[in-house]
Image (spheres, rainbow, N blue to C red):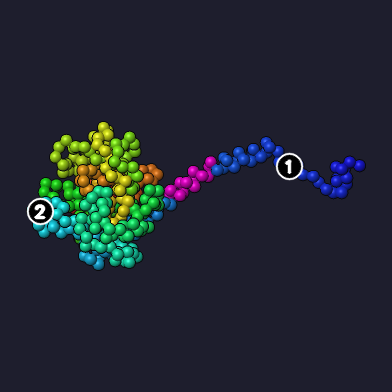
């Protein structure tokens, strides 16, 4: 009796293995399912990251309102009191330029870190490359400390260090209203000297408080061939005129700089990479350009120029938190006039809640 017949007689059944064709079919089905599920999973993760960003912004807004209630004003953009006490002095006589966000630490559960800051040093950010000054060394440990609520998880660059993903709104242009002949300066939620919420006469629900801003490119000091404006910014070799004093003038300068690749990339690798310093390079933004504008940002100084709200979220949206604490994603397709109206606290513009 053959072996197979003996097995059948003994009740043993031999099972045929999977053929190569069948295995390939199974693998093909799994690949198709993965192709369908992975993009959906990626979209879910992106949505979660955007919502976490929105939650961080709301937490900052709540802390800001608590600071206001305790201190009687908004967090200061710097601790320099010379300009409004002695308006005849030239700019930057003294500058203790610590970010508004740094003053919020006790309301964010970071009292110990706040107490470690030496707010008495002058010219903390007097050099664009964080030169080795006494002021720099006096706050070196704090400068290198990461605060999670300041970081948007969607921005891979921001997750690498003590970065700041959320900037305070300084209005149409600059945060210093006493600059002579600068009519677009000082109209945001953050200005020097700090305002009270009662001075937001346009309404808290239609005045931006903070918005997202990705950190700068890791490459610096070179003429850029990159056409992506998200992380890059231009330092125009010349504006062709005196320093522009209006938002429209800066928008025009940046548009030209973007087209002709005019000038070099300013040290944008530092932009937003630290939460402790202030200025438009680190802690503030303005409404010269719409969110995620295709025009590159450009600047001649820490606050003079376009410092736009920008993000890496899908759909080109940027999370913005308003003075009443509500967060809303804003698309780059928003009308520039509406966006600028949302940036001013006292412009008298009529903005519908349905914009």
Give the percent coordinates (x, y) of residue 102: 28, 59
Tell me, for residue 268, which label it has, or none: none
Secondary structure under the numbered disc 1 in the rendered image: loop
Which residue is the site of mark 1?
17
Give the percent coordinates (x, y) of residue 142: 31, 60
The magenta-colored residue range is 35-47
Q: Is residue 31 above or below residue 212?
A: above
Marks 2, 1: nearer the viewer: 2
Count of numbered marks: 2
Asked which quadrant contains residue 234, the reply is top left
Secondary structure under the numbered disc 2 in the rendered image: loop
Q: Residue at x 21, y 62 (%)?
A: 120
Magenta span contains residue 44: yes
Q: Is residue 75 visible?
A: yes
Tell me, for residue 89, which label it has, or none: 2
**Which of 263 and 6 lies nearest the eye of the viewer?**
263
Magenta span contains residue 312: no
Q: Is residue 297 visible?
A: no
């Amino acid at each position: 009796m053959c072996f197979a017949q003996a097995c059948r007689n003994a009740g043993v059944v031999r099972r045929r293995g999977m053929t190569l064709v069948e295995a390939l079919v199974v693998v093909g089905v799994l690949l198709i399912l993965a192709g369908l599920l992975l993009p959906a999973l990626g979209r879910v993760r992106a949505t979660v990251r955007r919502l976490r960003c929105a939650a961080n912004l709301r937490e900052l807004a709540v802390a800001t309102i608590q600071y206001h209630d305790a201190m009687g004003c908004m967090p200061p953009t710097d601790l320099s009191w010379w300009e409004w006490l002695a308006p005849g002095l030239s700019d930057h006589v003294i500058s203790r330029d610590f970010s508004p966000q740094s003053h919020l630490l006790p309301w964010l559960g970071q009292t110990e870190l706040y107490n470690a800051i030496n707010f008495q040093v002058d010219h903390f950010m007097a050099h664009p490359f964080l030169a080795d000054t006494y002021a720099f060394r006096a706050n070196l440990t704090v400068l290198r400390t990461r605060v999670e609520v300041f970081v948007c998880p969607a921005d891979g660059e921001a997750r690498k260090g003590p970065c700041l993903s959320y900037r305070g709104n300084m209005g149409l242009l600059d945060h210093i209203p006493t600059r002579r002949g600068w009519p677009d300066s000082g109209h945001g939620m953050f200005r020097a000297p700090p305002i009270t919420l009662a001075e937001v006469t346009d309404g808290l629900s239609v005045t931006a408080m903070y918005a997202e801003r990705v950190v700068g490119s890791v490459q610096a000091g070179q003429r850029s061939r990159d056409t992506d404006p998200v992380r890059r910014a231009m330092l125009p070799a010349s504006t062709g005129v005196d320093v522009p004093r209006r938002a429209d003038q800066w928008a025009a300068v940046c548009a030209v700089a973007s087209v002709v690749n005019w000038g070099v990339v300013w040290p944008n690798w530092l932009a937003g990479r630290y939460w402790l310093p202030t200025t438009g390079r680190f802690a503030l933004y303005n409404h010269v350009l719409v969110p995620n504008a295709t025009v590159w940002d450009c600047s001649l100084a820490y606050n003079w120029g376009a410092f736009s709200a920008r993000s890496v979220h899908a759909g080109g949206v940027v999370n913005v938190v308003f003075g009443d604490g509500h967060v809303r994603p804003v698309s780059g397709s928003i009308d520039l006039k509406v966006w600028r109206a949302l940036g001013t606290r006292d412009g008298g513009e009529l903005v519908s809640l349905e914009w």
